[in-house]
Amino acid sequence: MPLHSDRTMFAGRQVLLIDRHQPTRKVRARVMRSRGVEVHTVEDLADARVVWEPNFYDLVLLDVRRYLAGEALEFYERIKEASPRERFAFLVGPPAYLSLSWPAEVNAGVASSRGGGDIAKRFVAVT
């Protein structure tokens, strides 16, 4: 699909991206913005609670790799209770699919992460 079609399809969408790791947060936001998505980025759940509004975001993306399962699930449940139709996705692995050439600091973080499969299994039940 051509880039202009992607841009048209996603233009004007509102996404809240919660990711503690700045390099991956920047890459994810840059890719979505290149498709016309308005991306609000925050570093942690405390900041997300401040900026989140019911029925405002089309999608909330939460990188759960740096949170205890209970923290992430509690945040998800609060959002779904207040805004049941809001879409929510758990990011459970490194965003290697977004770029063919990663900055060195991102590669180092991806190489050192372990347990991605276990994290995915814990969160699959709520999606």
Image: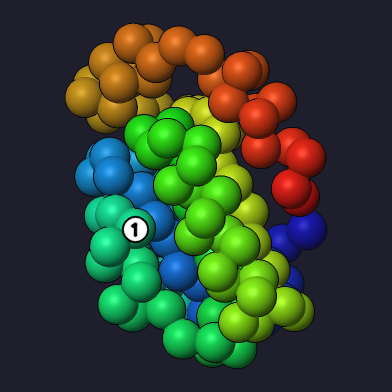
Circle 1 sits in a helix, a strand or a loop, which is it? helix
Would residue 98 be seen by someone viewing this image from the given angle? no
Relative vertical location of residue 74 with respect to residue 115 in this rendering, above or below: below
Counting the numbered discs, the total is: 1
Name which quarter of the figure residue 22 lies in: top left
Name which quarter of the figure residue 81 lies in: bottom right
Identify residue type, mark 1.
Leu
What residue is at 53 percent from the left and 29 percent from the top? Answer: 93
What is the x, y in percent for residue 13? Answer: 58, 81
> Which residue has dot 1 on it?
45
What residue is at 42 percent from the left and 79 percent from the top? Answer: 52
From the image, which quarter does the N terminus lie in? bottom right
What residue is at 58 percent from the left and 26 percent from the top? Answer: 119
What is the x, y in percent for residue 106? Answer: 29, 27
What is the x, y in percent for residue 57? Answer: 55, 80
Relative vertical location of residue 79 with respect to residue 29 in this rendering, above or below: below
Q: Residues within 10 Å of mark 1 (few under 14, many from 20)?
A: some
What residue is at 75 percent from the left and 79 percent from the top? Answer: 85
- Is residue 123 found left or right of 30 in the rendered image? right
Q: Which color scheme does this rendered protein use?
A: rainbow
- Is residue 70 found left or right of 42 in the rendered image? right
Relative vertical location of residue 61 with respect to residue 33 in this rendering, above or below: above
Relative vertical location of residue 8 with respect to residue 62 in this rendering, above or below: below
What is the x, y in percent for residue 123? Answer: 66, 37
Would residue 54 be seen by someone viewing this image from the given angle? yes
